[in-house]
Image (tube, rainbow, N blue to C red):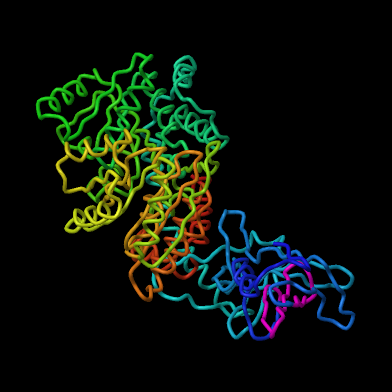
Amino acid sequence: MEIKTGNKIKMYELVIALTDLGYENVNKISMPGQFCRLGGSIEIYTIDDISIYIVDFFGEVIESIFTKSKARIKKSLLSINANILLLEDGTKILHGEYIVHEHHGIGIFRTLGTKKLGINEKRYIFIEYLNGDFLYLPENLKTKVTKYINVGRRVPRLNKLGTQTWQRTRRKVYENMLILAKELLLIYSKREIAHKKSYVINCDWEKELIKTFGFVETNDQAVAIEDTYIDLKSHLPMDRLICGDVGFGKTEVALRAALQAIANEHQVALLCPTTILSEQHYTNIQRRFKNLPIKSAVLSRFYSKKDQLESIEKIKQGQIDFIIGTHRLLGGDVKFKDLDLLIIDEEQRFGVKQKEELKRLRAKINVLTLTATPIPRTLFMSLSGIRDISQIESAPSGRRGIETEVKKYDEVIIDQYIEREIKRNGQVYYLHNKVSTIAAKASAIKRRHKKMRVEIAHGQMDERELSDVMIRFTKGEIDILVCSTIIENGLDLSNANTLIVEGADRFGLSQMYQIRGRIGRSPRQAYCLLTHSEKKLTDNAYKRLKSITENQHLGSGFDIALSDLEIRGGGNILGREQHGAMEQIGLILYSKMLKSAVDKLKSNC
């Protein structure tokens, strides 16, 4: 951020801007990254300079900027960089958040700052430990620190500098971790025993599929496809996680992998969380594979029992190459002739029973999991290197971030959002997640917007009726869809670019992010209004809504998953003993240490 003399800006606006940049508002400045308000002035101790600056206001104009020193050097321009520590693993640490140094333990990140040593100036990370002691870590050594992400609810204890307590904790955790590392190696060994035949990549079929793509691959997409091909050419079963925002092209990676599995004379199954999504995938696959000798089918409740039995028999005989469906695919009556690739769309949407079956399959066949926001266990597995991960962070050309606002419920504001979208010939999702009152809500909206076509959609509707509504919404025959969270996984519409959510404080962060991904699927600017009715939000609800508004940029699904983990805790990710060990040192350092232990044991095998 740059501020200049003569700039028109209100003092409170500068206070908000500095706070957003990670600066701490204090009564008296004592370190870089702080500011204080004194009458008609604001004092700022920037992180890039050892000077404190005074910004004087005259009304709503910056009158002067000068250093707080005897020399009082005047400046016409002051550059202020964000006081946020960005780590190489992609995490960011804000002022006041917990941080872990691998040799000194848990502290609090206070600020970045410049200190003078002789005639030289050097950048440091200021970390506060127990009893107010500080560690000044050169910024070029930031690989020594990780963000502390808790897996429980307890507030972590700060370590004391200059004692052996932290080293004893690390040794104890490492000894505990070796047991888990050995268990994980058993999983690796089962995959080694499976020893599958490696794939030969069919370039001619791939060229035919690319003709129907209609887009140019992003760099991340290309890397994810190549990662997947390397896995398929290996003799080990693949277990790869493709993490990327809704609409960032995860499905394309899956289709390329499916194509190669079928080209190598194997069957492929695509497991979807909802019937509607399985139908959407089936329609897309039929279109994309129309010029290739590939037979596909969908197995869902939309079809009669007779049709389902017929498809099951063809699957058993190997007459169907690509099978799409819900958890129905995991039923005991569905037998595959040669299933070698399982694609899972949003694994977190499946139940415990289905996840156990998926766990069993992972040791035998290739598994590709697609997700926008990984669940804690999946996130942990990827951070620790137990599962391979490909992140698709680059947005398709022309896509924009979704403008997101949080407001107290107000029909006037809601109607403004609706009218703006309809005026530009767009469509609106209105999320009202109470089935008992959803019809009344739709009627109320219809009364206020008489010329608009309003319909409802929720999970308790008849499958055929629900499908009909969704199809009509897709065709643009409905202006406002008053719906439940049934829309969380499913529709891919470029014309629906306004989402209004009632009671947004009651939703989980990852779920809210997934729902918001229903809009913003085109170059047109998308808008999301999150409303709440509480006079005062709970601490966790506030954190969730703050995180969703801060992560408006494209490709922030992985950050959202980390934020969700911080707010809710990871729960019992790997059992009670490991849970306690993770709490002692934080999830990320635990993951790094586990990866190191697994690699060490593997090299000694």
Residue 252 part of the magenta segment: no
- What is the magenta segment's predominant secondary structure? strand
Residue 185 horizontal side relative to residue 131, left or right: left
Horizontally, residue 319 falls left or right of residue 218, namely: left
Q: Is residue 51 magenta?
A: yes
Quadrant for the N terminus, please: bottom right
In the rendered image, the residue lying farthest to the front is 451
Percent x, y of residue 155: 45, 76
Q: In the figure, residue 492 lies in which quadrant? A: top left
Q: Position of residue 21 (x, y in %)?
A: 63, 66
The residue shown at (35%, 57%) is 501
The answer to whether residue 144 is visible is: yes
Q: Is residue 376 visible?
A: no
Residue visible at 19% across and 20% down in the picture: 314
Indicate the position of residue 76 as horizontal and vertical percent values: 82, 67
Which residue is nearer to you in this view: 112 or 440?
Answer: 440
Q: Nearer the viewer, residue 154 or 596?
A: 154
Give the residue drawn at x 33%, y 69%.
Answer: 533
Query: Is 508 located above or below residue 330 in the figure?
Result: below
State whether residue 578 is above or below residue 487.
below
At 61% from the left edge and 74% from the top edge, which residue is drawn? 12
The magenta region covers 32-56
Q: Would residue 522 appear left or right of 258 to someone viewing this image? A: right
